[in-house]
Amino acid sequence: MLLFIGKVVVLYLIYVISIRILGKTALAQLTPHDFGALFFLAYMLFGAIDIENYNQVVAGIVSIVIINLLLSKLSLFHKFFSTLFIGKPTILVKDGKIVTENLKRSSYNLMELLSNIRTAGYFDINDIDYVILEPNGKISVFPKKKFTHVTPNDLNIGVKDTGLPVPVIIDGQIQHDNLQSLNLSEQWLKDEIYAKDYKEIRKILLATVRDKNHLVEIFSSY
């Protein structure tokens, strides 16, 4: 029975790792080759498990539930595990310009990007401020302020663009990669946080910095 459980756990982990290697788009876009890859992975990996009796079925189900809960807990425990098992958001368009390096790194097709922008209701990439590829493979499209619905541009109202709020603290953990992308130091962040009377960073649930005016916002703490 222990050998069976070990086999189930190992094959499950191989499946999860394989999907992570395929990338975020394999989960969301499901092109014919993505669907085929997921189907054959499942068929070959789980087809290798020989279930002989009812006890093995129960043991297999319990094992998968436990390992899945464990991976979820590890993802919450530290940023390294969250990035490893879940991934992190990737900016594909910034200030109306395509970030080709991130596009290639994410194995995201340019035609799919343009299609998703059109699906969001925007036909000119110059109208877009940011496009973010989320860890689950979904696309978030943020238009420039003057093109939002109902647009301030239509009402002749001036709009001050403060930029995208970038998470710099999540669950008490400083997001050093995000800080680096903003060209800001950890000491700068600490000074800003302390100036807002928050003395312990580990107790901050979420803090963001606007990428254009570097405004620090703390939404909630515990």
Image (spheres, helix red, strand yellow):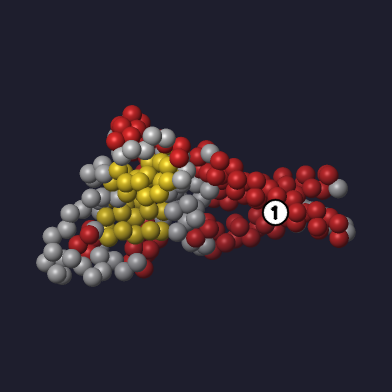
Judge from the rendering whether residue 62 lies leftward or rightward of residue 54; answer left or right.
Answer: left
Q: Residue furthest left?
A: 156
Please name whichever residue, 142 or 70, is drawn nearer the observer in this view of the structure.
Answer: 70
Q: Nearer the viewer, residue 85 or 36?
A: 85
Q: Residue at x 17, y 58 (%)?
A: 159
Disc 1 target residue: 65
Does residue 75 show up? yes
Is residue 100 placed above or below 156 in the rendered structure?
Answer: above
Query: Of residues 163 and 193, which is closer to you in this image?
Result: 193
The percent position of residue 56, horizontal first and vertical second, equals: 84, 55
87 relative position to 129: left or right? right
Q: Please give the name of the residue rendered at 46% of the width and 37% of the height, measured from the top-left corner.
A: 202
**Residue at 82% in and 48% down:** 4
Where is residue 193 drawn, in percent x and y? 33, 37
Say which residue appears at 32% left-offset and 49% top-offset: 165
Viewer-closest of 145 and 116: 145
